[in-house]
Amino acid sequence: MSNQKGLTMCEKQERKLAFLFILPAFAVFLLFMFYPLAYTLYLSLFKWNMVSPNMKFVAADNYIRLLTDPVSLKIAENTLLYIVILVLLNFLVPYVLAFINTFQMRRGKHVYKALLFSSSLIALVVGAILFQWIFNPVSGPVGGLAEAAGFSLPAWSKTPGLVILVISLVAVYKAFGYNFLILLSGMNGVPEELIEAARLEKTPSRKIFTQIVVPLTSSTAVYILIMTIVQGLQYVFTPIKVLTQGGPNDASSNIIYQGYEYAFSFYETGMSAALAIVTMLIFLVLLYLEFKYVEKGVYYEN
């Protein structure tokens, strides 16, 4: 009985010690995560311009205005389009190229990797300015090629749809190499014996990719997919700010940039905070769907 009691006391001391070790991390998490979140939620219920000492309580008016404003719907469509383009170019394309590099190429693998990753070393601001020159309809190389082919390049910064594509390409240019290398590291974990056995059975490369490589690299792929969605929200902010400022007529703006505009251009802090809360809820829904449906098919190596 005394041994059991002594063991219980020892366990209590270990739990207290463990709590003391966790306490600093919890305090930091509380200070830099929960407090800003709670304060953002608080601000979303007020009308305030960040200058006046008076804050007017408006309850859910900011959320109602946000969800009923036609501009908000347009910006939500833009954001979804950014995400779709980046998922295609920054997730599916590097996934296939990582497979080719790992299991199809015999020579020049390291050169290929270095070339694809090199663009990730360039800052987004520099990349935005570079693409502005490349797609300049008058003096850029793409405009010159178009003129040589007998047609003129439209002013992409003033053309809805095309402006989103060009800004997406800037984000792709920045993040493509990083996504490629992470997917490549996942491919390197696939047992070579499985690939060789499939080749001996004369299995087509397409089936090797879809039936062997994709299931065994699904954990890495899910991570890159989530990161690509985040890139569709965050990475496009810098090229939007540098190149178009959301124009023409909000045709290139997205949720993150619109939140910035509300706060620092229109001085509508409550609207900016409400948009931040809505964006967070969208992330939570995406995470829920990911855990509920995608994680079931994910392979994790023991």
Image: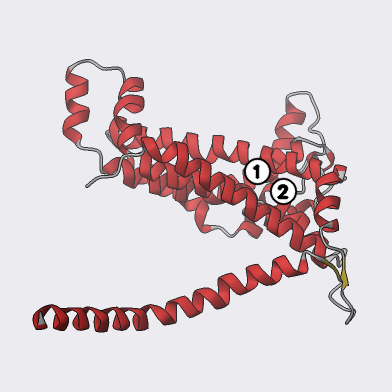
Q: Is residue 79 left or right of residue 267?
A: left
Q: Is residue 122 above or below residue 209?
A: below
Which mark lies nearer to you, 2 or 1?
Answer: 1
Q: Quadrant of the N terminus?
A: bottom left
Q: Give the label on residue 295, or none.
A: none
Which of marks 1 and 2 precedes in the sequence? 2
Q: Quadrant of residue 222?
A: top left
Residue at the front extreme of this rendering: 1
Q: Residue at x 29, y 32 (%)?
A: 103
The span from disc 2 to disc 1 (Cα, nearest Å) is 16 Å
| Residue beneath disc 1 | 168
**Is residue 27 in sight in this rendering?**
yes
Q: Residue 119 in the image: x percent, y percent?
A: 52, 51
Residue at the spot 86% in from the left edge and 67% down from the top edge: 267
Residue most extreme to the top: 202
Q: Quadrant of residue 163?
A: top right
Amino acid at pointer 2: Trp
Residue at numbered disc 2? 133
Q: Nearer the viewer, residue 74 or 170?
A: 74
Name the residue located 31 percent from the left edge and 32 percent from the top edge: 213
Circle 1 residues within 10 Å: few <14, some 14–19, many ≥20: many
For label 2, count other residues whose C-alpha is less than 10 Å away and answer few (under 14), some (14-19) or many (20+): some
Q: Is residue 26 left or right of residue 69?
A: left
Amino acid found under the numbered disc labelled 1: Ser
Q: Nearer the viewer, residue 226 or 166?
A: 226
Asked if residue 115 is positioned above or below residue 269 in the image, the reply reads above
